[in-house]
Image (cartoon, rainbow, N blue to C red):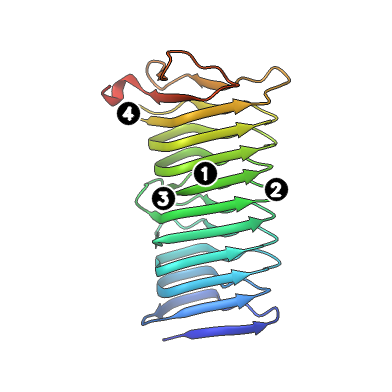
């Protein structure tokens, strides 16, 4: 099946697949949709789907949904979701699905920008390349019982954490991660393995702790780069690092101190990680 689809400005989903055994889409395919999801796949046993570009604008729900899908989903150029009322890109309940995207852009979502949930807990399962995500009222990147790899980009979350990872395997590289007015922590890494490397991390006025790195696994490393945490209140903590699986990780910064109201470089690393 070969598809080049530009849907009219209505509520038609670009590609809808529900309860299907085999879906095979090859060639130089593109999906561009307004006022609807670009792709929605649920309960697909064997998918082999490749698109050149995938674009959804002003969807009343998700921009792209992959739920209970096995096989592969790839975008060779770019995936773009803009102004989704729900979450932008959602991959869930799909432990046997690999996702490969070189550039992932999710802008101005009313929910979470990217949600990866109940998939394989291997970082290589979902590769999102350069990630550029902004939210109006949600988390930037959610990784729960799942894995993800990013190669760069920016996350700017309003009303949620820039990254919220729990029981996850990650290889996250970003230029900036920013959270403003999160309803919980500004950045949360819990029971996580792998690595996080961010050049500049900013958290402003979260309800919870500024940065949480809690109960992570041996070898896990987190380098938050130049780090600014401000607006902490209600007894919350600026940077909370504790309860590694073996011994407690330690922090480094360029002044050997961390002032939660000033810019510093902060790194956490489990001693088993080799530094």
Graded by Cα atoms within 10 Å as few (under 14), some (14 to 19) or many (20 or more), the crowding at tag 1 reads many
Name the residue rendered at 60%, 32% in the picture.
203
Give whichever of discs 4 and 2 has the lower sequence position: 2
Q: Secondary structure at mark 2?
A: loop
Where in the figure is residue 208, as x and y percent of width and height?
A: 66, 28
Q: Mark 1 highlights which residue?
A: 144
Q: Mark 3 highlights which residue?
A: 120
Residues at discs 4 and 2 in contact (Cβ within 8 Å): no
- In 3D space, how far apart are the residues under numbered discs 1 and 4 (Cα atoms)? 19 Å
Q: Is residue 37 visible?
A: yes
Q: Is residue 205 above or below residue 120?
A: above
Give whichever of discs 1 and 4 has the lower sequence position: 1
Q: Mark 2 highlights which residue?
A: 137
Q: Secondary structure at mark 1?
A: strand
Q: Mark 4 highlights which residue?
A: 219
Count of labels in the image: 4
- In 3D space, how far apart are the residues under numbered discs 4 and 2 (Cα atoms)? 33 Å
Give whichever of discs 2 and 3 has the lower sequence position: 3
Q: Quadrant of residue 236?
A: top right
């Amino acid at each position: 099946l070969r598809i080049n689809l530009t849907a009219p400005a209505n509520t038609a989903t670009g590609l809808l697949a529900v309860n299907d055994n085999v879906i095979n889409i090859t060639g130089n395919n593109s999906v561009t949709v307004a006022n609807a999801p670009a792709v929605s796949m649920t309960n697909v046993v064997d998918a082999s789907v490749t698109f050149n570009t995938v674009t959804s604008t002003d969807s009343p729900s998700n921009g792209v949904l992959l739920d209970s899908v096995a096989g592969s989903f790839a975008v060779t150029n770019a995936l773009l979701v803009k102004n989704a009322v729900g979450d932008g890109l959602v991959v869930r309940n799909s432990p046997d699905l690999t996702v490969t995207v070189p550039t992932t852009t999710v802008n101005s979502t009313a929910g979470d920008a990217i949600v990866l949930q109940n998939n394989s807990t291997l970082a290589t399962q979902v590769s999102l390349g350069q990630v550029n995500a902004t939210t109006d009222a949600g988390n930037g990147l959610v990784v729960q019982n799942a894995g993800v790899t990013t190669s760069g980009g920016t996350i700017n979350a309003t009303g949620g954490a820039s990254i919220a990872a729990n029981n996850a395997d990650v290889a996250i590289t970003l230029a900036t991660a920013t959270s403003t007015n999160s309803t919980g922590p500004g950045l949360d890494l819990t029971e996580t393995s792998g690595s996080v490397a961010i050049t500049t991390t900013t958290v402003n006025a979260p309800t919870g702790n500024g940065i949480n790195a809690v109960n992570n696994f041996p070898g896990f490393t987190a380098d938050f780069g130049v780090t600014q945490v401000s607006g902490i209140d209600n007894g919350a903590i600026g940077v909370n690092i504790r309860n590694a699986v073996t011994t407690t990780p330690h922090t480094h910064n360029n002044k050997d101190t961390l002032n939660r109201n000033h810019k510093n470089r902060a790194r956490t690393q489990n001693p088993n990680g080799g530094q």
